[in-house]
């Protein structure tokens, strides 16, 4: 059911990870333009086309899960980190 939602509404094809607890599928979904538009519009109350999917590698060789870079320099960068597990302590 969940894969049907992805294929029908996001037009994305991705083989689900074999290992449970992986966040690869979440990263693929958040890197889709449709989802980026929803996130940017919700967080910043501006149209999603004001941002582009950016480079997730930093100068210290660390990586973020998803980075949305603004087209205009006056807007903030949005960095999204996707946790592997969510438990009551996390909330």
Image (spheres, rainbow, N blue to C red):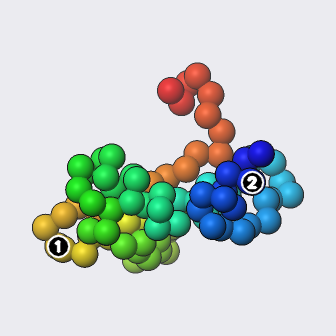
Q: Is residue 58 visible?
A: no
Which quadrant does the N terminus fall into? Answer: top right
Dot 1: element: loop
Give the residue at the far top of this rendering. Answer: 88
Give the spatial CA distance, label 2 vs label 1.
36 Å
Image quadrant in which you'd find residue 16: bottom right
Tell me, for residue 73, which label it has, or none: 1
At x 27%, y 60%, the residue is 47
Task: Write down the residue under mark 2.
Answer: 3
Image quadrant in which you'd find residue 52: bottom left
Picture coordinates of residue 37 (x, y %)? Answer: 39, 60
Picture coordinates of residue 63 (x, y %)? Answer: 51, 67
In front: 74, or 6? 6
At x 26%, y 68%, the residue is 50
Q: Compared with residue 46, is residue 12 higher up or lower down, i.e. above or below?
A: below
Q: Nearer the viewer, mark 2 or mark 1?
A: 2
At x 65%, y 67%, the residue is 12
At x 52%, y 66%, the residue is 32
In front: 21, or 14? 14
């Amino acid at each position: 059911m969940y894969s049907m939602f992805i294929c029908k509404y996001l037009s994305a094809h991705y083989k689900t990870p074999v290992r449970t607890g992986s966040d690869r599928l979440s990263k693929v979904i958040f890197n889709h333009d449709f989802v980026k538009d929803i996130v940017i519009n919700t967080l910043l109350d501006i149209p999603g086309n004001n941002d582009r999917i950016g480079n997730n590698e930093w100068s210290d060789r660390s990586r973020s899960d998803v980075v949305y870079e603004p087209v205009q320099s006056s807007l903030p960068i949005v960095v999204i980190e996707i946790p592997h597990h969510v438990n009551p302590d996390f909330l």
